[in-house]
Image: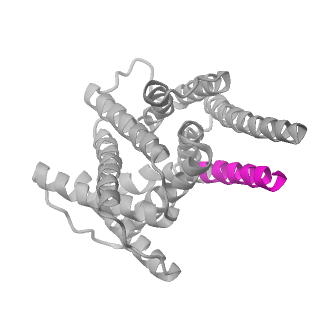
Amino acid sequence: MFRLKSKKMNSRIKGFMAGILAAIFYGTNPLGTLPLYSENINSESVLFYRYGMAVVIFVLWMLLRGESFRIKWGEAIRFAVLGTFFALSSVTLYLSFHYINAGVASTILFSYPIMTALLMVLFFHERVTWSSTVSIILAVGGIALLYRGNNGVTLSGAGLILVLMSSLLYAIYIVSVSQMDIHMSPLKFTFWIVFFGLIAILFFSIFTGRSIQMLHGAKAWICGFQLALLPTVLSLYFMTIAIKNIGSTPSSIIGALEPVTAVVISCSLFSEVFTFRLFMGIVLILSAVILIILRQADSSIGVHKKTLSEN
């Protein structure tokens, strides 16, 4: 029994570490997107290269590990739905970059922990705990402080709606993954999500009537590769591990680390000033993440002690 509980504790630690990595990697999204936009590459093309290169990376990774690509028809249907949700979340986020600042959009996107928690409560009767509530409040407060827009500037209504749609679609994706009984490796699972996401992107391109543009120059291809590797392959891979080990709500709350990543990138690479306001925002977000981790750890220790006393 002790080994079983120790294994469960290690699984939670693994889940939290994976969730942190997923958030950090996803936070690099604007890093490759904005330079491509500056070269007049449309959203459909940016997403195509992001998902297309990611599929190639996954194929090579799976071949090196000797993983089978085979799935059942029922699994294919579920992957197609999940991949479409994730792809549409990317589409609406990238479209919002045309209307509002990418940093602001990335900040608003992280209202999805609230949506995730509400979906779990409404449809799966998950109990609302005080730690989850306080963590969400701290995360939202920190994200609000990380918004660095000028006073009096009104956000674009279209941009706001698009990024909120992206947040909702991502929350649905996370909840759906948490409810799936996964009997395959995270690598194989994530590959099929991205594969069907790529198909959804191609259909979206046909729907909008905008063709896929060719990338020119080493910088553009490096940006495309960065988008494929960090916010797609690695972020999705680690998010799958996190959801599997600690559940959807804690995973989504840890995802609030993404705006922290965005601030670090902007201050270190784009010479933006690190203000006290940003510092306080980061402190609140980190407090939210630490609180949810400690609460989960206490729960595991409590269950372990109860089991020992019963034995």
Q: Main secondary structure of the magenta part?
A: helix
The extreme front residue here reads 311
Nearer to us in this view, 204 or 265: 204
Residue 8 shown in magenta: yes
Nearer to us in this view, 275 or 128: 128
114 shown above or below 263: above
Residue at 51% in and 48% down: 27
Please give left or right for residue 286 compared with residue 197 in the image. Answer: right
Q: Can see residue 235?
A: yes
Residue at 40% in and 44% down: 173
Residue 114 x, y percent position in the rendering: 49, 28
Please give left or right for residue 289 compared with residue 77 in the image. Answer: right
Residue at 24% in and 55% down: 200
How many numbered circles are shown? 0
Residue 258 x, y percent position in the rendering: 54, 43
Quarter of the rendering containing residue 286: top right
Residue at 51% in and 33% down: 113
The extreme top residue here reads 152
Q: Quadrant of the C terminus?
A: top right
Residue 267 x, y percent position in the rendering: 57, 45
The extreme left residue here reads 209
Please give left or right for residue 37 compared with residue 304 in the image. Answer: left
Residue 99 shown in magenta: no
Please give left or right for residue 13 compared with residue 201 in the image. Answer: right
Nearer to us in this view, 265 or 178: 178
Tell me how the rendering is colored.
one colour
Q: Can see residue 42?
A: no
60 shown above or below 108: below
Residue 175 x, y percent position in the rendering: 45, 40
Nearer to us in this view, 280 or 254: 254
Residue range corresponding to the magenta coloring:
1-19
